[in-house]
Image: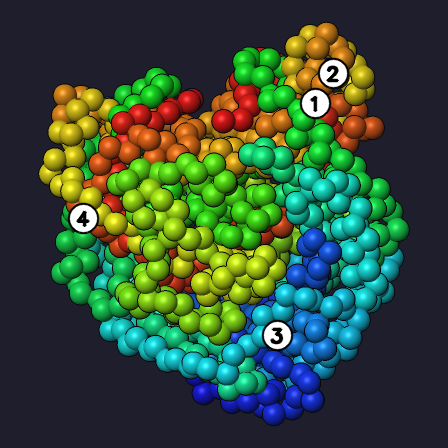
Amino acid sequence: MKNHFKNLSSTLFDSLNEGEVLSASFSGENSQFIRLNQAKVRQTGLVDDFDFGIKLIYDGRTTSGSLTLSGNMENDEIHAISLLATLRNDITQLPEDPYIVMPLGAPSSENMTIGNGLPFENATEAIIPSLGDTDFVGIWASGKIYRGNANSLGQFHWFETDNFALDYSLVTPENQMVKGTFAGKDWNQSTYEQNIQNSLKKLELMNRKPVKVKPGDYRTWFEPAAVSDFLGMFSWNGISEASLQQGSSSFGKMRHDGIQLSPHFSLREDFSSGMVPRFNGYGEVADESRTLINKGQLVQTLVSSRTAAEYGVESNQAESGEYLRAPSMRPGNLTQDKVVETIGDGLFLSNIHYLNWSDNPGGRVTGLTRYACFKVEKGEIVAPIETMRFDDTFYRYFGTELEAVGETTSVLPEVGSYGGRDIGGTICPGILVKSFSLTL
Amino acid sequence: MEKQQLNLHELLGAVHISADWVGLREVYEKVTPRMVRDGVPVANGIYSTHGIMVEVLSDGQFGYFGTSDLTPAGIALASEKAYQQAKLAAKYSLVQFTDEARPAFKGSYQSPFVKNGQSLSAGELNELLLKSNQALKVSDKIVSASSIIQVLETQFKFVSSNGSDITQDFLMIEADLSATAVDGANQQTRTFGGMRGNCKQIGMEYFDSVDLIAQATRIGEQAIELLDATDCPTGEMDVILAPDQMMLQIHESVGHALEVDRILGDERNYAGWSFVKLEDFGSLQYGSEHMNITFDPTVSNEFASYGFDDGGLKAEREYIIKDGKLLRGLGGMESQIRSGVDGVANFRASNWNRAPIDRMANLNLEPGNSTREEMIESVEKGVYMESNRSWSIDDYRNKFQFGCEYGKLIENGKLTKTVKNPNYRGISNPFWNSLKRVGNQDTFGIYGTPNCGKGEPNQVIRVGHASPLCLFENIQVFGGA
């Protein structure tokens, strides 16, 4: 697809009139999806989807467009040229945009990862027999993913990866559940089977009768998957500089009131894993690593070049949406074997669910416990808990109440697929919080 | 930019596999977003997608291939790969289907409109956005103001080997206005119905019927009003919810809970399960006797009206809950076959690249007979809330917590002072049984959302919700941090 994108982009660049600047983007995939329920196939299929986008800049104005590529160059050229003509007609009618980010001519980059995953025709036979008579539910997604960016000034970026993810739940006869993920680029049958066996061991703990806990404040350990969900909230009216400038950020207390998070909490963006491209939609390349919060102190927000132009601040090559692309939280020194003992009396939460800001300026987040969540007494797991709602602020759980951070980090891959399969993931440890508020 | 015209019957003729059933579902969609923020254009574009979902049934298993290669050779190859997927999976099928799951219907649907999507130019729309944006800025304390118009044009065709032949065309508009007011650490945002709730099947005549400038001025003024408002009180009290919040309440605590594929467990790894069980249909008292919920794809201008679902089933109005009693599930033909529960035509896909699953479409609360004044007068102590801004509910669709943009105290039967950060929480079944009064037709509002997420692989789909004003008694209410 790289050459198809390159050639199609070049055709459009060659057709530009004087004063026009054009950037092009590509997002595509060849995917297999197998949806499973009760360890059987509910739905199965393949998707080839290639989206080609262009952004036209002319006379201080800009407009964008996209279309689905067929893979046939002659056909795709006809439609892409037609789209460009439509945008040319529109652009002269638009108001001027004083904050246009002009494309750069360099640098260019190429990052292609070759995977050794399961051929599509082998997937069901590799995955399903190992599940036996378990109540297994989830989604298998695999295949190639492409991202590209080019512009009429000569810049060209290409990112291509080939990976798989089996995102699943195992369920007891009493409807208690544990969550598992098996993801990577090289399939190993025995590692996969071990992953399932490990989850089945966790599921045994869920056979104990769940207990009700009352609303109130609890000493709580969050596993990395839960911490990853908390960090994900920073990408939504949080760490974005534009959100701060526009009065819609939970980081206002840090920026304006000098409030700090815990000295145990440090966060950076780290592209060194290669899970996501370092280039953004403007073609800019981010630093390989960038500290955002250091020992509780906000060092920098995510600043796109458009925000930089609008508010007179310095860009750090963030994506236009100013969301975390490669979050990595620094580990601490609490070893996993000491976690339950250190909780003493409290809660052990593996996963949380359906988070939303209940008070964005206050940093308050509501959500629910889900999957393997346990009551802990005298340093031992007692029983799973029934689902509870929480409502608490990150200024407490990443701030005043953060007692310890786990020694080891986990890689939590993005497994979402709205529109297309996501790439990337979050690297983070678990955290121990002195007090966490359950409400219903 | 013209859509590539296809003859689906010819493409179906290019398929040469020995499957039990083959269907082609073509989707073309053009989205034209335009947005002005703080007096500056931040989005203008034309984004299109075009492809065909080739679906094949073999040995009781459906397999699919979503492709953008729209040539006869491309469709033939896609059908072979879909057929292979079905064959390989059939040994492990959860359900053995026949073509009963894809009933053959012929027909067409055209969403209502007077003025087509091109009747206002890019320049005219930007001018309207700039003026409304200016009107949002009623004070220097409005630090950010956004005006958004999005025009959506969708064409859908479905043909199958057992005789389906369906064409559906949709023209839709989403509009939103938003003003954020800031005073120190106090931040308040007011929008045009919350969560892009103003979305409809309508043409450009929408802008003749809605005075965006007047709405923008009201929204800006209310954002400023909220800055000086006291926090919503905490405690157990009555709440009256406006239709633009009822939209969310119906969606989360009725709609998703009644999707039959959720009840059958398909969604357990993602959005979750349901507190509703198959045996509850026909017996569960879901809410009070004032609760009447319909699945109604026939409401003119509502966002998710249609003639047929994506499995080809003809869509009709049905009572889901009548006088509070649960009658019918939100399950398409596959779920009806699997569960034995009566359902509706709601087997829907987000686009050509996703397989259909059970979704909401238009799910509405029917009007009652209380006037707005009667409802307010009946409350001794409570809060009136408008426009959703926060939503969260558990994986069984039990414990929810919702927040609104704008509230008014109700004291001794009268609306009194404005309150900020109004929130409430509850549990779905007892909450709906606390429904005390339902507003009449005069209080009825039609809303929707373009952002309902569900399914693996993930899909986002458009739904419509219409509701009158509703009064719930003895609800947990609270304010900000």
User: Which circle marks residue B416 in the picture?
Assistant: 2
- On the same chain: label 2 and label 3? no
Instruction: Classify B361 as above or below A290.
Output: above
Quarter of the image for residue A345 reads top left
Q: Chain of mark 4?
A: A
**Disc 1, SS:** strand
Q: Which residue is mark 3?
A: A55
User: Which circle marks residue B228 in the picture?
Assistant: none
- The answer to whether the residue labelled 2 contacts the one labelled 3, judged by CB atoms less than 8 Å apart, is no
Q: Nearer the viewer, residue A315 or A88?
A: A315
Q: Which residue is mark 1?
A: B418
> Which numbered disc flags the more N-terminal residue, 3 or 4?
3
- On the same chain: label 4 and label 1? no
Disc 4 residue type?
Answer: Thr
Disc 3 residue type?
Answer: Lys
Residue visible at 75% across and 40% down in the picture: B139
Q: Chain of mark 1?
A: B
- On the same chain: label 2 and label 4? no
For mark 4, does the 10 Å Cα neighbourhood hold few (<14), some (14 to 19), or many (20 or more) residues? Answer: some
For mark 1, does the 10 Å Cα neighbourhood hold few (<14), some (14 to 19), or many (20 or more) residues? Answer: many
- The answer to whether the residue labelled 2 contacts the one labelled 4, judged by CB atoms less than 8 Å apart, is no
Instruction: Indicate the position of residue B282 as horizontal and vertical percent values.
Output: 55, 27
Q: Chain of mark 2?
A: B
For mark 2, does the 10 Å Cα neighbourhood hold few (<14), some (14 to 19), or many (20 or more) residues? Answer: few
Quadrant into which the N terminus of chain A falls: bottom left
Instruction: Classify A331 as above or below A103.
Output: above
Distance from Cα at disc 2 to Cα at disc 3: 51 Å
Disc 2 residue type?
Answer: Thr
Q: Chain of mark 3?
A: A
User: Which circle marks residue A408 in the picture?
Assistant: 4
- The answer to whether the residue labelled 4 contacts the one labelled 1, judged by CB atoms less than 8 Å apart, is no
